[in-house]
Image: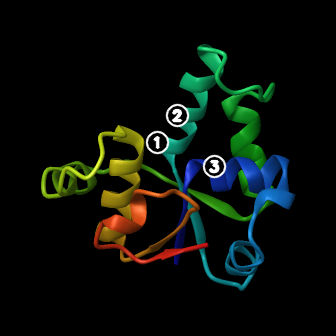
């Protein structure tokens, strides 16, 4: 199972040329692919402060995810408890939640992020 980072979701839906060949392969190899609801939240926030120029609503993005066979992973209390155990490598709350979810659910993370691989989690790019 794979959990995709926010930028991976954006690139997979809107600009697949930015995805690595490995990321594209992992997202289409028949394994279950998930995106955290935290990524949708991050997109909404960035849209609201004009840091992300995607004109689709979050609802439209979730429909696009369904069509692309990307499952939405809800936030659960066990994910929030796991955040408290993570080392303070960086302060991005969305990344920290995604990392906690991946650890808790036994997933790897498809990401190009510099900081996420510094945690005790398997990443792929």
Query: Label 2: which residue?
Result: 42
Vertical relation: 41 (above or below) 124: above
Left or right side of 89 for 27: right
- Contact flag, marks 2 and 1 (Cβ < 8 Å): yes
Dot placed on the residue nearer the N-terminal end, 3 or 2: 3
Other-residue count near label 3 (Cα within 10 Å), few / some / many at <14 / 14–19 / ≥20: some
Q: Residue furthest front?
A: 114
The residue closer to the viewer here, 91 or 97, is: 91
Query: Label 1: which residue?
Result: 38
Displayed quadrant of residue 78: bottom left
Q: Secondary structure at mark 3?
A: helix
Displayed quadrant of residue 55: top right
Q: How far across and down, in percent of the image, does residue 50 sit?
A: 66, 16
**What quarter of the picture does the C terminus occupy?**
bottom right
Other-residue count near label 1 (Cα within 10 Å), few / some / many at <14 / 14–19 / ≥20: many
- Contact flag, marks 3 and 1 (Cβ < 8 Å): no
Give the residue displayed 79% in from the left and 57% down from the top.
Answer: 18
In the image, which disc is placed on residue 51? none
Q: How far across and down, in percent of the image, does residue 87 sit?
A: 17, 57
Left or right side of 106 for 23: right
Query: Label 3: which residue?
Result: 7
How are the colours assigned in the image?
rainbow
Q: Secondary structure at mark 1?
A: helix
Other-residue count near label 2 (Cα within 10 Å), few / some / many at <14 / 14–19 / ≥20: some
Give the residue displayed 23% in from the left and 49% down from the top.
Answer: 77
Dot placed on the residue nearer the N-terminal end, 3 or 1: 3
Give the residue displayed 35% in from the left and 73% down from the top.
Answer: 121
Vertical relation: 121 (above or below) 100: below
The residue closer to the viewer here, 4 or 70, is: 4
Q: CA distance from mark 3 to mark 1?
A: 12 Å
């Amino acid at each position: 199972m794979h959990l995709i980072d926010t930028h991976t979701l954006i690139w997979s839906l809107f600009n697949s040329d930015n995805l690595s060949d490995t990321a594209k392969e992992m997202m289409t190899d028949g394994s279950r692919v998930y995106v955290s609801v935290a990524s949708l939240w991050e997109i909404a926030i960035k849209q609201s402060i004009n840091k992300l120029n995607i004109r689709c609503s979050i609802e439209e993005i979730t429909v696009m995810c369904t069509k692309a066979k990307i499952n939405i992973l809800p936030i659960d209390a066990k994910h929030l408890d796991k955040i408290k155990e993570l080392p303070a490598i960086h302060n991005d709350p969305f990344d920290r939640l995604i990392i906690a979810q991946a650890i808790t659910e036994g997933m790897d993370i498809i990401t190009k992020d510099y900081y996420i691989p510094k945690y005790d989690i398997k990443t792929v790019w």
